[in-house]
Amino acid sequence: MPQVSVTINGRRFRMACENGEEPRLMRLAEDLDARIAKLRARFGDIGDTRLPIMAALALADELSEMKEKLQRLQPEMRGTPQSTPHAYSDAMFNPALLLQRNSWAARAHSSNRSPRPHAAQPSPSS
């Protein structure tokens, strides 16, 4: 199992991950570190543990909002190729996938097309 060394809030951590997930883990750590830096710029240096906790709560809030948005979109997505429970459960744990599917659903809703970017469209019958 590969290990990645990341720096968050000025401290180095060695993290294990699955094969091929190293770049993703590094991006996630960089995102968290950037969030903590923004909080530090806004509130000052208020302690070693308080800033990471605030960043974690902000991330939990964003995730909660995305889950609520997904639940509101589920009725609209019924009947689309992605309306299986598996597709929704994947999106619940992957915010990037959730945002991508939300953007497809918004395009499909506004243009009355399939939400998948490469979905085959039925040809009109002659």
Image: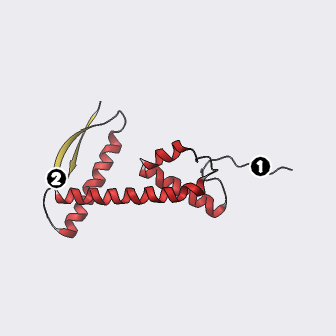
> In the current view of this chain or complex, which residue is farthest to the bottom?
42
Q: Secondary structure at mark 2?
A: loop
Instruction: Kindly identify the residue that appears in the image at 35 percent across and 33 percent down.
Output: 19
Q: Position of residue 67 (x, y in %)?
A: 44, 55
Q: Position of residue 108 (x, y in %)?
A: 62, 58
Q: Position of residue 47 (x, y in %)?
A: 13, 60
- Kindly identify the amino acid type of the residue bearing the numbered disc 2: Gly
- Kindly identify the amino acid type of the residue bearing the numbered disc 1: Ser
The correct choice, above or below, for 94 with respect to 52 in the image is above
Q: Position of residue 64 (x, y in %)?
A: 39, 57
Q: Report the residue marked by disc 2.
A: 10
Task: Answer left or right for 113 relative to 91.
Answer: right
Nearest the camera: 90 or 6? 90
Instruction: Kindly identify the residue that appears in the image at 62 percent across and 64 percent down.
Output: 110
Q: Quadrant of residue 18?
A: top left
The correct choice, above or below, for 91 with respect to 103 in the image is above
The correct choice, above or below, for 42 with respect to 24 in the image is below
Task: Answer left or right for 113 relative to 29.
Answer: right
